[in-house]
Amino acid sequence: MGLRDIFTGRHQVKGPAPDRLFAITTAYVDLQAEHGVDPSGTAAIVFQALATSEFESTIKDMEEVVTATGGDNGTTVKTEDDSFGYRWMILRSPAGAPSVEDLAVGINAVSSSIETAGFGERLLCAVFGFTDAKGQRIYFIYNYKRGYWYPFVPAAGDAQERSTERELQLKAQVGEEMPVEPEIERWFPLWGIPI
Amino acid sequence: MSFCDNHCMAHRRQTFGKDSGLQARMALTLFLLGLLYVVFVGVLFLAGAGAGLIVVVAVVLLLGQLFGSDKLAMAAMGLKEVSPDEEPELHGIIDRLCVQADLPKPRVCVIETNVPNACALGRSQKSATVAATRGILQMLSPAELEGVMAHELTHVINRDVMVMTLASFFASLAALILQFAFFFGGGYGGEEEEREIMLVILASIVVYAVSFVLLRTLSRYREFAADRGSAVLTGRPSALSSALIKISGAIEQAPSQDLRRVEGSSAFFIIPPRAKKSLMNIFADHPPLEQRLAALERLESQLQGGLTATNA
């Protein structure tokens, strides 16, 4: 933010960074083969739903497009609003056949149609669900503003605790395959992920 | 990756119009303030050596204010840092807004009072603190609270504490000169020197009075800018409107006992002015509620109108 912005007290909400969403499609291969972290077959994209008719119709069209393309590979789409007023568009692979590629294509279709409609700055993040050998739920979160990924591992139980140790292990495991958010204080948690 | 950059930029569109009027008024205020200060510095130079010492003292005070007043204000207002475990909802809101604004997470504090209010502190984005009172947490819905916290985070993004502190530097200097005026009045020196001292004192009075008005004006403009920033950040101008209506209503309609508690606990207004300047309080030096609501209403209608091409 420049000096001019400071003087004018004006700032723009950042649009999405160069897209590195598809890093997940290469990163998961090693995770699954070598570290026993399996994709759960669900992914979601989270954005601020503007309460305007233009935005709503954009979303509606998009949902139809994703459902139509998803029909080929069996991916289903569901939307949910969370208590913070953010909308989750949840994509689910058909049972028994989780496909990170199909999910990433679906998520990308959603984000690019939001961007094309001019609402790119409303995108918050994309979340991909995984489980490890012990049944622990693991999420990889893609921050659209920064163009970085980070792991998020909520500890078991209802308490809002995260297993930072596990997250750091995962960071080491994905290694070079994925652009991981370098500032660890920006690994923002998402509690109550509905996937 | 550059091609992707271009691709993204091509689709950028403004959801909200420009705030040219506000910007022009803010620029005028800053210009007048600058002009006033230039003249003041000129007078100080004319007065000669004695003034040099005052400037040094003022610079030291300014630095102290920039680097020390946070802790003073935090102590005076009873800010208590809270962990995500203690205040999951507040942290959740701020986490999401920080992602949205691409901002490092500030310290999150709660003030244990029923008075609904919120504030932001800190000279830079890295050292920022945002705080909400217990009253505001209980009163507002999540969307409204998000609007208020986005307002405070916009103060952090715009570095309003820094801007106001720097903008008021010469006003503080003038105040300092007035406080120590009797030292100069000592009358050991020629008639000429006494005239110069009188000139400095007179100039200080004028600078203090005029800059007071200008600074308050500037502060109000920064509030408008923060309201706007909140709307841009959350995409929900009306949620902030609703929060402002609730907060102001609560302040007006509180029963007398609560009002007395308002009096007693308003560390906001009792703490020394230097510390007070380090706050961007949601209601300190605020524009009238009607004007803020009207500005937010304009933003909401721009949003609803799907303002695409009419940026001018």
Image (cartoon, helix red, strand yellow):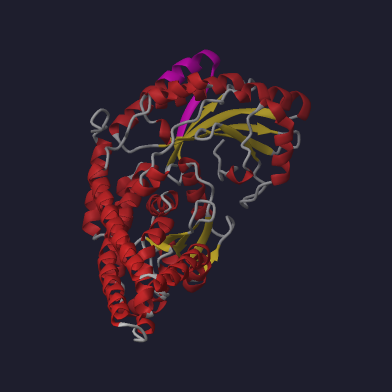
Q: Residue at x 51, y 56 (%)?
A: B128
B77 horizontally vs B23: left or right:
right
Depth check: A190 or A134 in front? A190
Residue at 76% in and 29% down: A36
Question: Is residue B139 something that shows in the picture?
Answer: no
Above or below, A96 against B233 in this view is above
- On the question of residue B25 being in view, the answer is yes
| Image position, residue B272 (x, y; %) | 42, 75
* Residue B164, x across and y down, in percent: 38, 59
Majority secondary structure in the magenta region: helix
Q: Going by the picture, which residue comes out furthest to the right?
A: A34
Question: Is residue A20 one of those drawn in magenta?
Answer: no
Q: Is residue A163 above or below residue A101?
A: below
Q: Is residue B312 above or below residue A22?
A: below
Work out whether residue B25 or residue B128 is closer to the camera in this orientation and state it: B25
For the C terminus of chain B, the image quarter is top left
The boundaries of the magenta stretch are A65-79
Residue A75 sits inside the magenta stretch: yes
Q: Is residue B153 above or below residue B307?
A: below
Residue B42 point in image, percent of width and height: 32, 62
Give the residue at x 55% y 26%. Answer: A92
Q: Quadrant of residue B114?
A: bottom left
Q: Residue at x 44, y 51 (%)?
A: B153
x, y percent for residue B154? 41, 50
